[in-house]
Image: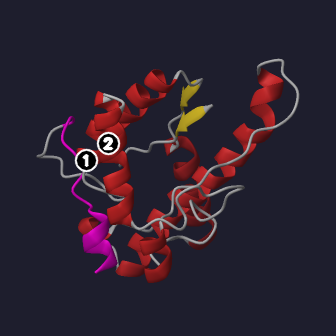
Amino acid sequence: MFSTLPTKNSSAATKKRAATLASELGCYHLNMGMDMMVDAVVKTFSLLTGKTPQYLSRGGTLQEDSALQNIQARLRMVMAYLLAQLLPWVRSKTGFLLVLSSGNVDEALRGYMTKYDCSSDDINPIGAVSKGDLKKLIRWAAVNYNDPALQTVEEAPPTAELRPTDEDAGEDADHSQLDEEDMG
């Protein structure tokens, strides 16, 4: 099972890479937009407090920006566990699925993660792998298995895609929120 949990901040290029890779791997793939859930949480907060947080690029503070990014990440974790628990039932199968996470050692050492997001998992196969080594591994697999989908993943800039995109960049452009810039 392979799930893509994009928001309006996710680029079309990222969604396409995920769908292509899932197809090549022969995975059951779900692409579930998270905007309705994110909007519901923000609206609930606004009803409770009378304030609506904004991204930094839209006039908000760093605190607001961080909170808006974190809620997306945390809701993805909630959805991942719900899917892992109930998809076997939906597909008339027994058992359960494991949630894999995607945080690497560089992000963990720098604290570049949101508590209860991709740092929450049943198994993290890349948790002890550096970002540089992971990139080399993906490049090796793309070449040795002649896998164009992996090549596009390896060539893509690493990004959380939790902030609004540059509207002038176009729908197919890669996102401009680069992990390395956020990590400092």
Kindly identify which numbered label has been placed on residue 156.
Answer: 1
- The residue shown at (61%, 58%) is 124
Where does the image place residue 85, in percent across and percent down from the top left?
80, 40
Percent x, y of residue 125 = 58, 55
Q: Which residue is at the front of the view, 42 or 19?
A: 19
Towards the viewer: 144 or 132:
144
Q: Position of residue 155 (x, y in %)?
A: 23, 46
Q: Is residue 175 visible?
A: yes
Reading the image, the residue beneath label 2 is 153
Q: How is the image coloured?
A: secondary structure
Q: Point out which mark residue 21 bears.
A: none
Above-or-below relation of 107 to 164:
below
Q: Indicate whether residue 182 is drawn in magenta.
A: yes
Residue depicted at x 39% and y 57%: 134
Residue type of the residue flagged with mark 2: Val
Is residue 8 covered in magenta?
Answer: no
Residue lying at the far right of the rendered structure: 94
Q: Which residues are magenta?
A: 171-184
Question: As drawn, is 150 to the left or to the right of 57?
Answer: right
**Which part of the image, by quadrant, shows the N terminus?**
top right
Q: Secondary structure at mark 2?
A: helix
Question: Picture coordinates of residue 146 (x, y %)?
Answer: 31, 28
Around disc 2, counting alpha carbons within 10 Å, would you say few (fewer than 14), some (14 to 19), or many (20 or more)? Answer: some
Q: Is residue 26 above or below residue 137?
A: above
Question: In this rendering, would 84 be left or right of 93?
Answer: left
Name the residue type under label 1: Ala
Q: Classify 147 as above or below 177.
A: above
Q: Secondary structure at mark 1?
A: loop
Of residue 133 and residue 61, the one placed in the foreground of this image is: 133
Q: Are marks 2 and 1 in contact (CB under 8 Å)?
A: yes
Quadrant of residue 174 in the image?
Answer: top left
Quadrant placement of the C terminus: bottom left
